[in-house]
Amino acid sequence: MIRLFSIFLAFSLAVDIHGQTAADVLRYSRTFVGGTARTMAVGGAFGALGADFAMLSVNPAGLGVYRSSEFSITPGYQFQRIETVRGGEPFNNSFSKFNLNSAGVVFDNLSNSEESALKALNFAVGFNRLAIFDGEFVTSEASARSLLERFLVFTNDGNAGLFGSQLALDTDLIFPIDPMSANCPCTIDILEGDLVQKNLDFFSKGAIDEIVLSAGLNYDHRLYVGATIGIPIINYEQRTTYTETDDNAQIPFFNSLRFEEEFSTTGAGANLKLGFIYRVNRKIRAGLAVHTPTVYTLTDDFRASMESSITYNEGDPPTIASSSSPIGEYGYDVKTPWKVIASGVLILRKIGFISLDVEWVNYGNAKLRVDLETYPDDLPFEESVNTAVNATYRHTFNVRAGIEHTIKLFRFRGGYAFYSQPYRSSVNDFSAHLHRFSAGLGYRQKVFAIDLTLIQEMTDDIFVKYEIPGSNYQYTSDLGISKMHVLASLSFKF
């Protein structure tokens, strides 16, 4: 079975002190080629070709290849299926959603002088979607160990957070060992070997949409140079509902708990992309692009609630207690790593082309930065997250390849993209590569074009629900994820 990485799923439930983790840094650092149906149909391997709006977020030198002004728009539809385990049996969770993947306009500024080596200086503005965070699934199983053990560790260490441990204290799920005292050390009703029924309902949505402001020039139809100021905008929402129940009535006092979290991240960043395309001859072009780090300024808003059901005296009805946290807010920055992309294409006149892109990026160099003026005590937290990022993630090579065949006004396309796993080999025991297969059809006339593309992803991942500090225990679930994207692009020359 192919094991792949699903970026929106890499987080741990119930981080008691801070919500930000190494997985959050990776989530906003790992972007993909997105945008028009034509680029996606050839696996995103368009870096040496140009004249496609998606390339403004990959190799902006492609803007210099345009010979006319153009408007393009790309709506899409996503189908997703996530296979989990429910009651010991495989269970499929399915959903679908409309997306707008790209929209923008290119303004050509062609030279009227045949003697000038500068043949064009073009400009463009619009946006491309670089990541999608939508996901929805449920899991359930009966097993030992409890989320309360995690909260108990923080409580007895004197670090009961308002968004986890304190809620368990408020609902009497954690209580003092000495019944005559209101102070810890504390304990819980669930023993380490007790079986509890665990259920998780997960939902997320959001995306990274990059606004692009680009310029590209054509020098003597031989060298193309471009630059993009990228302004990526992040919107991410996540909701989880986690329950534990004593279905067999084997645990004294404890009946159930229900823990809910709501979490959102919003913000924006800025980066610079520089690109070059060199036309070796009529058949061969080579491209090179360098992306500076994106520096995001982000804000997290979060809240949590807990509900307990406890039977204090045999024969009495259960006592239901609930508690909610305040609404929390935390501001921080994320700095993504540098990215370098080398491209090549073989153009067969009136037949089509074969293209290849190779991308290098080191996720271990991503950084979280805390505003120490606002949070003066959080330097150790910042250092711990960045140490975890460096220890967990590594440099990767991503490969994209595609082919287009021309028959009169029609274009037939196929592509494959391989995104290497971001994890160091010592971190996990599975291969977390991402594979993307694509196929498409295009119809192009002088003034307009329409392109249709189908993209298939097949993914497996491990979802970490929570960890218990001071032990090797992680409560995890295997997920099998299948995504299908349908894209349609319309473009008009003017």
Image (cartoon, rainbow, N blue to C red):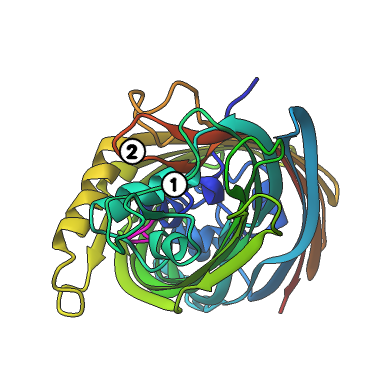
Q: What residue sits 45% from the left and 79% below the top?
A: 327
Q: Where 45 falls versus 38 (above or below)?
A: above
Q: Which residue is mark 2?
A: 393
The picture places residue 377, in percent across and down from the top left corner, at: 14, 68
Q: Is residue 97 left or right of residue 5?
A: right
Examine the residues drawn in magenta and state their main secondary structure.
Answer: loop
Q: Which residue is mark 1?
A: 188
Contact between labelled residues 2 and 1, with CB atoms less than 8 Å apart: no
Query: Based on the displayed image, in which of its 4 quarters is residue 126 positioned?
Result: bottom right
Nearer to me, 243 or 288 = 243
Is residue 174 in the magenta section?
Answer: no
Q: Which mark is residue 68?
A: none
Q: In the figure, 359 relative to 114: above or below?
A: above
The magenta region covers: 15-20
Q: Amino acid at mark 1?
A: Ile
Label 2 Cα neighbours within 10 Å, binned few <14 / some 14-19 / many ≥20: many
Quadrant including the N terminus: top right
Q: Residue at x 26, y 36 (%)?
A: 391
Secondary structure under the numbered disc 1 in the rendered image: loop
The location of residue 483, given as percent across then percent down, is 72, 43
Q: In front: mark 1 or mark 2?
A: 1
**Residue 219 drawn at (x, y percent):** 41, 62
Q: Amino acid at mark 2?
A: Tyr
The residue positioned 53% from the left and 35% from the top of the image is 476
Q: Secondary structure at mark 2?
A: loop
